[in-house]
Image (cartoon, rainbow, N blue to C red):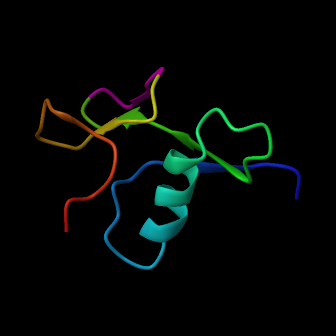
Amino acid sequence: MVLGLILNRVRTDDFAAISKEAADSFGDEDAKYVLQGRDENKGVYTPTQESVLMGSDTPQLLSVD
């Protein structure tokens, strides 16, 4: 694998660690993963790493849990 695309679902399970790694390595030349944000209310990808969860209007990078 050259580069993995992770869709930011603001998860709280074991997959959250990979999302954090992707966020922490943003801009690094040797990053393994990139994090793609999305707006669940509109059903579109965002031009940032942050996602807006359904029923919210606040972008989130990672889960606070």
Q: Is residue 3 left or right of residue 11?
A: right
Q: Is residue 60 left or right of residue 50?
A: left
At 48% from the left edge and 20% from the top edge, which residue is drawn? Answer: 47
At 13% from the left edge and 30% from the top edge, which residue is drawn? Answer: 57
Q: Is residue 50 left or right of residue 47?
A: left
Give the residues drawn in magenta, as a range: 42-47
Q: Is residue 62 left or right of residue 17?
A: left
Magenta residues, dominant SS class:
loop
Quarter holding the N terminus is bottom right
Query: Which percent across, then down, holds residue 46?
Result: 43, 24
Q: Residue furthest top?
A: 47
Query: Which percent across, then down, holds residue 36?
Result: 53, 38
Q: Nearer the viewer, residue 64 or 45?
A: 64
**How many marks overall?**
0
Q: Is 13 placed above or below 24 here?
A: below
Q: Nearer the viewer, residue 54 or 20?
A: 20
Query: Which percent across, then down, holds residue 38?
Result: 40, 35
Magenta stretch holds residue 59: no
At 37% from the left edge and 31% from the top edge, which residue is drawn? Answer: 43
Query: Which percent across, then down, holds residue 44?
Result: 42, 27
Quarter holding the C terminus is bottom left
Q: Is 11 placed above or below 46 here?
A: below
